[in-house]
Image: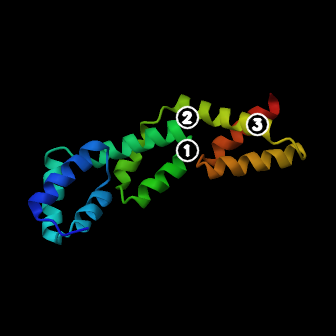
Amino acid sequence: MPTLTPSQAWEKIKPYCAYQERCHAEVKSKLYDFGLTTPEVDQHLSRLIEENYLNEERFAVHFAGGHFRLKKWGKVKIAYALKQRQVSAYCIKLALAQLPLDDYEATLQRLAEAKWQQVRQGTVAARQAKIRSYLLQKGFENTLISDALRNLAEG
């Protein structure tokens, strides 16, 4: 990408941030791709935050909610993905707290039931092990998985 002047970079980064929520690391990387220097990048980031184009809390809450609702990710996987994007621990905690507990547990139970129907071979213990592995991979907590498997065994 050609090197842009700071004013050209500003005009390009505003719609980039307005289009969808972005994390600070993603925007910083984009500004460096425009060929800006570190002081210019820092200045642009500050201005984006001041003008509310960039908000890490808002990004974290949207990211967590979207990945939970659309991809059915658990809190562990969401927290890991946010850490990968260099989101602060405070914002991660805030975002995970926004996930409704009833919906979270209901989603976990639905995923467990669907997988139970899908996994037909093996003993009950082998089926439960496959389901546990699947739900751990989706990012759900082991204690909640145990409760969901107990509900399946009783039901």
Q: Residue at x 33, y 45 (%)?
A: 59
Q: What residue type is disc 2 on? A: Tyr
Depth check: 105 or 5 in front? 5
Q: Earlier in the sequence, mark 1 or mark 3?
A: 1
Q: Which residue is mark 3?
A: 150
* Image quarter in which the C terminus is found: top right
Q: What residue type is disc 1 on? A: Trp
Residues under labels 2 and 1: Cα distance? 10 Å
Residues under labels 1 and 3: Cα distance? 21 Å
Q: Residue at x 22, y 65 (%)?
A: 34
Residue reaching furthest to the front: 2
Residue 73, numbered circle: 1
- Which marked residue is nearer to the observer: mark 3 or mark 2? 2
Q: Which residue is mark 2?
A: 104
Q: Residue at x 11, y 65 (%)?
A: 5
Q: Earlier in the sequence, mark 3 or mark 2?
A: 2
